[in-house]
Amino acid sequence: MFTAAHRCFTRARTGARRARPTTIFLLCAMCALGLPACSGKVGHTDAGAGPSLEADGEADGAQTGDDDAAGNPGGDAGGGDASGANPGGGGLDAGDTRIDSGPFSCTPTSCEAQGRSCGRIDDGCGSALACGVCSGGQVCDPTTHQCTDAATLCDMAECGATTDACEGLVGCGSCAVGQVCRAGHCEACVPRVCGATQCGSVADGCGGTLDCLGCAEGEACDAISHTCKECEPTSCLGEGVECGSISDGCGGTLDCNAGGGGCERSESCSQGRCVPTLPPAECVAQGKNCGAITHACTGAKVECGTCAPGEQCVNNECTSCVPTSCLEKNVTCGQISDGCGGQLRCGDCESDETCHQGACCRATSCAAQGKNCGTLDRGCGLSEDCGRCDALNNQVCGAGGVANVCGTCTPTPGLSCLNPRPNQSGEPAWECGDLWDGCKNVRCGTCESGEYCSEHSCTSCPTQADVCTAGVCGTISTPCGNVTCPGCPDGEGCGAGGTANVCGPCPTNLCIGKDCGTRRVTGCAEVSCGAGCGSGQTCGGGGVANVCGSCTPRADACGTRVCGSVWNGCEMLACGAGCTGGARCVNDGAACRTPTSCSDHVGRCGPIDDGAGGQINCQCPDAIPCVGGTCCEYSCGDAATQYGGNPALGCVAGPQTNFPDTCGGIIQCPVCGTPPPI
C-alpha cells in the first residue's frame, strides 16, 4: 500500500505541476486505501485543472465524471476491467477531490457491528475506523481484527516475519548462524559463487564475502556493479544524479549528497532523484500529513511531518495560513508568533519601562511606596524584597495594620518553652522544635545524637529492626536518615509487585511474543528473549520492542550529544565517548557532570541539588539543628559566652532569654538558677 501511494504521489507531482500538494496527497491516500472512484495512476488534465485518475487496466471504464461549471472535463472512470463488461466507478473532477458517481448516500458501519476489537477497518463510506489497540505483548490479527499472541499469528512459521492488521511486522523468530529463512522455515544457507564477469569483494549471501577475480590491465572493478570496465571518470552532475552514491567510473564511489547535493528535509532519494517524501503509511491510511497521530494498531505516537511555509497544521492536515499582525493582537511591544511559524517584533519600551503582556508598563518600588519588609508586587509582573523586621524587638511585618511595613507585636503573655500553654495546666515543657509566641518562632532546644524531635519531645531514632519488618526491602527514609533493609527471597524482587519497598514475585512470562533483547521488572533480574536477529534486522527495528524487524537507522540520531543514548530508528545508540569517573550525563546528552557530595556543601543541610541531575540529603554534625537548609551551630552555651551566663550548663544570666541564632531564627535559653523542666 505504501509503495503504491508513494509512486502515485511522485508521478502526480511530475505530471500535475499546478496541483496543490495537499490535493495530490489526498488522492494518493485514497488510491493506497483502495477507496471508490480511484484507480492506480495519476495523470495530467487539460487546461492545468488538476490531477485526474485513469484506470490501470487494459481497457478504461466508462467516462462518468461530470464537467464542472467552467467546462473543464471530469475525471475518467476508474477500475474498469479489460473486457469492458464491468465499467469502473465514477472518477474525480479535475479541480477537486470529491467522489462523483451520481447521488451518494452512505451509512457508516462501526467496529462493534463488524465484531472487530483492534486495528483499522473501512467504515463502508470511504473512511477508516480505529477499533482499538492490543496490549500485553499481543498483536492484531489482520483477518479477524482480534488481539492474539505473536505465536498464533505466525502459525507454523519458525522464522521470518508476518504482518498485523496495520501492516506492522511481527517477528516469528530467527535462524542460527549458517542458516537462512525460507517460507517460514530455517534451511542451510548455500553460499553464492563468483559470476563469470564479477570482480572484487562480493557478498556470498550467507554473511560472508567472496574475493572474485581482478581486472585486466587498463580496467577497473566497478564499485557498484562489480564488473570490469575501462576507467572513465565521471561526476554526479555528468550522470544527472542528485543524491545517493554512484560509481566514479574507475573503481571508486561518488557521494552525491556532499558539496551542496542531497535532498531537502521534505524529500527522499529514489534512484538518484529527490522526490517528495510521503508521510508514514499510518499517516497515509488516516489521511493525515502533519503533526502527531495515534497508530490505530499499536497506540504509538506517529509523526506525520510538517507543513510548508504559509501553511499551518489543523487537525493533522496542512491548510493555508494567513499571518496575524501586532495591531490585530493589540500588542505594542515585544515579540509574538504570527500564527504561521514566524515571529513579529511589535516595538520597544522606554528605558524605565517593562514590556508586560504585550504593553509597556512602569513598575513601582519599595522605596517609592514607603515599604520596608516582605515582598512587594511592583506591578508589570515584577516583585521586590523590601527587607525584614527586627524580630528580637518583636517587630513583625504588617503588625501595625499596614502591609509591607514593620509594626510592633505583643507576644502572648506568659508563653515560653517551659510553659507552652499558659492557660492550660499540666502541659509539659517543650524540649525541642519551634514555638510561636504570637510574634515569632522561638526555638526550644535540640535533641541529642541518636534522637529526633517528635511532638516537641526528643525520641530515640528507629532501628533497622523497627523499620525492616517482614516483606519490607530496599532503602527506607526515617527522621534520622536512611535505613537499608535486607533483600528479598529467591524468585522475588523489591517492588516487583508494584509497591515500592515491598517484596513481590518476579514474573516468568516477560518474553511471550518477543524474540530478542532483554526485559526486566523492578527488583528482578533481566530475562533474555532471544540470542539476536537475523541479517538486515535489529531488535525493535520494526517499531515493536523486543521483536526483530527491518529498519533504516538515522545516521544523525545523536546530533550534538556527547553522552547518553538515543533511539536511531532501529536501536538505542550510544552517543559520544560517554561519561567517566563517576560523572553523569545531563541536559539530554549535552554534557557530563560530576555530582557533588555533602563535603562540597559545608554548613548546608537537607535536600541539596548535586549539580548533575540528582539530589543528596545532607545532615548536620553533632545533632546541630537544620534550619532552612543551613546547619545552625549557635547554642545556649554560645549565648552564655556572648551575653553572660554559664556556657557549660547552657544557661544565661537574664533577664534576656531570646537570642538570634545566626541562622535567621531565635533561640530561647534558660536563666541560670531556674529549675529544669519536669
Image (cartoon, helix red, strand yellow):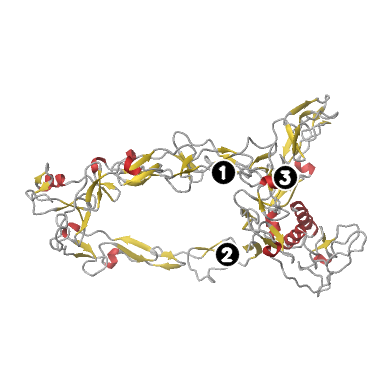
Q: Which mark is residue 339?
A: 2
Comparing marks 2 and 1, which lies closer to the viewer? 1
Disc 3 vs disc 2: Cβ atoms closer than 8 Å?
no
User: Which of disc 1 and disc 2 is earlier in sequence?
Assistant: 2
Q: Position of residue 117 (x, y in %)?
A: 66, 58
Q: Which residue position is annotated with label 1?
A: 566
Q: Which residue position is annotated with label 3?
A: 155
Q: Which mark is residue 97?
A: none
Alpha-carbon neighbours of circle 2 within 10 Å: few (<14), some, or many (≥20)?
some
Alpha-carbon neighbours of circle 1 within 10 Å: few (<14), some, or many (≥20)?
some
Locate residue 192: give its quadrant: top right
Q: Taking 13 as reference, is 578 left or right?
A: left
Q: Amino acid at mark 3?
A: Asp
Q: Taking 660 as reference, is 300 left or right?
A: right
Disc 3 vs disc 1: Cβ atoms closer than 8 Å?
no
Q: Taking 428 as reference, is 140 left or right?
A: right
Q: Position of residue 468 (x, y in %)?
A: 36, 42
Whether residue 558 is visible, yes or no, is no
